[in-house]
Structure formats: structure tokens, C-alpha cells
Amino acid sequence: MALDVYVGSLTRYYAGAWENLVEKAARERGAPPSVRSARPTDDARSQDRIRLQVVTWRAALARALGDRLAGPLEWDETEAAPWFTHRPGWGGFGSLVLWAAYAEHPTLRLPETLPEEWDHDGALMRSTAEGFRSRYSHLVRNVEMWLPVDFEITFEGEDVKGRRVVMGSVTTLRRQLADLNAATWKASAADVAAWGRAPIEEGSVEQRARYAFAVLSELAQRAQSERLPMKLDH
């Protein structure tokens, strides 16, 4: 199963009015469009209904979070809102999560290649254990959606469609990614940009983590600068 990261309005996301890199490449080759699980909704009234759902959900979430938020929980849900996407893949994302977990448990030995069941890795289990204050909580705690406002906690709640998901903050994720780089690679912006130029589907945990780091760093930067939510799509 593929893993993409989407940045943009949730109206566009749930309407299916976006495409991942593979779909875009297929369209540009003239191949038949793939069937998305959320089929594109072109009808303006249908998108208006989705937009109302999103805005209502967002208002309820803001009330529930209250003073935990450093600012208003608002972003552009109009059709004019920009959107961005990239594909770190599960292998890249999982490698980055493990890289972060082992960075805060240096006495444990990082595996050379990504284990098949990496989400049950010992270092990751320590980083997500109850009571442990992870320095990379908005990366390692199974977060599926990051909101464009600053707060420290991660929390589980219902998304727009009523699914239980873990949510975090775009601002905190960016800060934690920068901290991870400072604690491990100490890579320059030019280095990180070079890591993201070519997908790495096979290789060591570190090689795949570097690629995913470049992808997430770029998208988190766009999400923060454009004040838009960021979401995993799988």
C-alpha cells in the first residue's frame, strides 16, 4: 500500500479533487485515470456540503482544544486554496520514525534495514510508551493529521468523516524535525534538498529516512507558510 502526504484544504481532500504523483504521471502519459477511494466530486453543491462538514468539524475541535491552542484554528477551505503532495512511501516514513526513536534511545542498535513490522520495534515502543516524553512526539506517535496551529500535545479524535485518528501540530512537527536533524545529521538545507531529489525505495534505514525527512520537511514548511493542514493518505 502506498503512502502519500497531502497538504491543502480538507474540502479538496475529501472531495477527491487532487492527485498523487503516480496519478499525475499517469494522466500526463495519457493513461486512464485510476479509481480513487474517494472519487472526485465535481458537483459544486457536493463540495459545498463537504466544506460545511469541515468547517463544522473544525469549530467543534477548536472548542474541545480550548486554551491548548496558541492561536485560532483556521485555514482556507475555499477552492482557491493551494495544495501540494508527495510520496515518502511507507518504507521511507517508517525509516524516519525509527531514526527518530533510536535517536532518543542511543543505547539500542538501529537495524540496518527496515523490519517488516517496524511499528512494533523496541525503540519505537519505548518512545511511545505511556509517560515517556518523546522529543519527536509529533512524528513517532502514529499521527495522521497535522493542524496549522501551534500546540504541544498529540491527541486522538474523530476526523471529518468520523474516523478515529491521532492529530498533531504542523508547527511542532517542523520544530521536531529540525531538532532531529540537529541531533543526528546536522545537514544543511542544500543537503536536505539533495536527499529529496530521487526516491529511495530500497536501502538502509538511514538512506530511506533521509529521503522521507526531505519530503516531510518540505511539505511541513508549505503547510506552515500557507496555513493549511497536512495529512497522510494511504
Image (cartoon, rainbow, N blue to C red):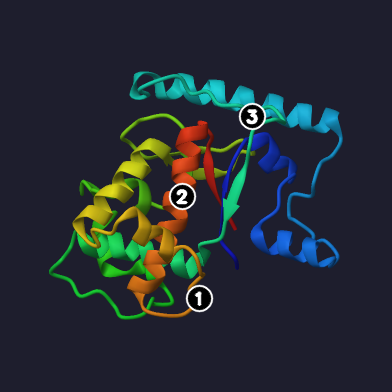
Examine the rendered structure and indicate whether residue 126 appears above or below residue 1: above
Going 51% across and 70% down the picture, which residue do you hit?
199
Could you classify mark 2 by the number of other residues whose Cα lies within 10 Å: few (under 14), some (14-19), or many (20 or more)?
A: some
Residue carrying label 3: 54
Residue carrying label 2: 218
Badge 3 marks a residue whose secondary structure is helix
Q: Distance of mark 1 from mark 3, alpha carbons? A: 35 Å
Which amino acid lies under the numbered mark 1 shown in the image of this protein?
Glu
Q: In this image, 232 relative to 142: left or right? A: right
Residue carrying label 1: 201
Question: Which x, y percent locates residue 43?
Answer: 87, 35
Could you classify mark 3 by the number of other residues whose Cα lies within 10 Å: few (under 14), some (14-19), or many (20 or more)?
A: many
Looking at the image, the residue that sits furthest to the left is 107
Which amino acid lies under the numbered mark 2 shown in the image of this protein?
Glu
Badge 1 marks a residue whose secondary structure is loop
Badge 2 marks a residue whose secondary structure is helix
Going 59% across and 65% down the picture, which residue do you hit?
2
Q: Distance of mark 2 from mark 1, alpha carbons? A: 19 Å
Question: Which x, y percent locates residue 182?
Answer: 22, 53
Question: Which x, y percent locates residue 88?
Answer: 50, 62
Lower position in the chain sequence, tag 2 or tag 1: 1
Going 42% across and 64% down the picture, which residue do you hit?
194
